[in-house]
Image (tube, coloured by chain):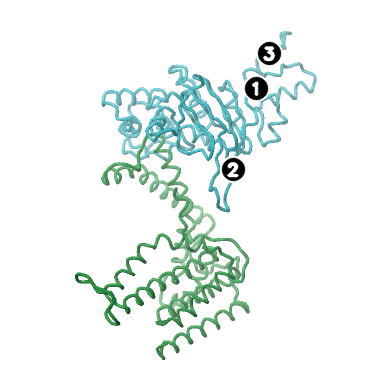
Amino acid sequence: MLKDITLGQYFPGNSFIHRLDPRTKLLFIIVYITALFVSKSYVTYGILLLVLAVSIAVSKIRLSAIFKGLKPLMFIMIFTAILNLFYTKGGTELFSFWVFTVTTKGVEFAFFMVLRIMMLISGTFLLTYTTTPMALTDGMELLLTPFKKLHVPVHEFSMMMSIALRFIPTLIEEADKITNAQKARGADFETGKLTDRAKALLPLLVPLFVSAFRRADELAIAMESRCYHGGEGRTRMKKLKMAAPDILTLVFSALMLAVIIILARFGI
Amino acid sequence: MPIIKTEALTHIYSMGSPFESVALENVNIEISQGEFVGLIGHTGSGKSTFVQHLNGLLLPTSGRVLLDGTDINSSKKFRHDARFKVGLVFQYPEYQLFEDTVYRDISFGPRNMKLPKPEIDERVHEAAGFVGVPETLFDKSPLELSGGQKRRVAIAGVIAMRPDILVLDEPTAGLDPEGCESILKNISDYRRTTGATVILVSHSMEDIAKIADRLIVFDGGRTVMDACPEKVFSQADKLRSIGLDVPVATDIAARLRELGVSVPECCYTVEQLRNAVLSLKKGAAEC
């Protein structure tokens, strides 16, 4: 039941995108999202959609996996579409009822909005599908290193994040086990009034929290006994290295952003 | 009529995904009222998956589970009621304790059965008695107890439902020898007093040799042996080939026979071996 959640799930592979440095991928996705927000026309959206399509094809991630990620956000997308549909003024009026009017501009805007959200999410899913959580947090830590000068605890943040990511599957499995055990004692999680159902969650949540604290305790002791004392002077077993493909990708992303900005400037 | 019967039970996890794996394949087992069955098998052999079918927590991919002759998944209601008939104690059950007092935690099952208050009270006392949880602990928080006591409270929580069939998945894992011994004794006592059917999943050949009347051996999701302990443990090579072992007593008896000492083949507990060796001293070997 809970196992079906895809949350930053990594799909092992050895494609061009899998092999890229996580920093490159992170920077690329930031540039890509910026470009998405700059673009306003069919041409620019087309270019960005093409980039996404090529990336997905190269990564060999199945399209169904991407769509599975989009599914839970369907509601937000529909909601955004409806809002934009009714509240955008301008263009010719298509039809109207009561206080709502739908214009051509509104339809166009809603379409772009949904497309933007879809591409944004697909892009970030592609990132998490092709990068291990560990590589991702490592990449983030290195990218944020300059902020250490401003006394931002970058290392601590990234450690917290990798621990959180590491324990998501463990806790999901644990929650599954506890749910089953309580069901075996006749607990009912599925029927009843909302208040009853909320109360029915107690037998799941209490043991889950207790075990999370126990794990935190054990992990802290394990880390201390291996002499963990924060990021100061800590070396890495796997050093991240930027190679030719990374530089190529970064140059490409800069060019892509430039093209989109210029096109948007000229109103295309 | 067998109290539990599985017909061509098959379970496949994550059907249709790249992570698909067959956990059970065509399992046909009949268990009669009052039997004490031991399930043994290597990690991942399907025994835990199997026991979760017995109270309808997992649905078969194909095949059926019959409880008293009725398909357990024939209706939602029947499946729900089956949970009270088939009491399942999971591995490390102490991690499921959640109430603020021991008493309330043990009474969780009976409360879900919607029993009247006096009956709940009676069952809690009875269940606590079976597993040796003294009443002085009733008002304590389960989290304050020791590991062994927590385990007892958790088992009492299932016994309080008075299940006809008690299924225990590795009830002694992680306990010290004394704790193991006394929990196994509690389980035997429960069975003797109530006449319940008991199914015990265990890694420990020692434990299982001591108390089960019948052993079912799982390997790769199939049942490969189903016989009394003597027969199962006499096939030491086959057991070893699927990553299991025989009890130490059986091993010692086998080596003694290799050395020409005529101990009988049916020794599988230390007790039996001791008697066999002692009677050898007297001249007649039997067990």
> Is B259 situated above or below B81?
above
Identify the residue under disc 1. B268
Crowd class of label 2 (few under 14; some 14 to 19; many from 20; radius 10 Å): some
Q: Give the drawing colour for chain B.
A: cyan
Specify whether B37 is left or right of B106. Answer: right
Say which chain tag 1 marks. Answer: B
> Is A16 situated above or below A9?
below
Which label's residue is closer to the chain start, 1 or 3?
1
Q: What residue do we see at 41% from left, 50% from top?
A: A213
Considering depth in this image, is B245 or B226 the residue closer to the camera? B226
Q: What residue do we see at 51% from left, 73% from top?
A: A52
Give how far apart the Cα atoms at labels 1 and 3 are: 15 Å
Image coordinates for residue B145, horizontal then vertical, percent: 39, 36
Image coordinates for residue B151, horizontal then vertical, percent: 44, 33
The amino acid on which the numbered mark 2 sits, given as a three-letter code, is Val
Give how far apart the Cα atoms at labels 2 and 1 are: 33 Å
Q: What residue do we see at 71% from left, 16% from top?
A: B264
Image coordinates for residue A46, horizontal then vertical, percent: 48, 79
Image coordinates for residue A230, horizontal then vertical, percent: 48, 64
Dot 3: element: helix
Crowd class of label 1 (few under 14; some 14 to 19; many from 20; radius 10 Å): many
Dot 1: element: loop
Dot 2: element: strand
Identify the residue under disc 2. B22
The amino acid on which the numbered mark 1 sits, given as a three-letter code, is Tyr
**Does the CB distance between marks 1 and 3 fall below 8 Å?**
no
Q: Give the drawing colour for chain A.
A: green
Identify the residue under disc 3. B278
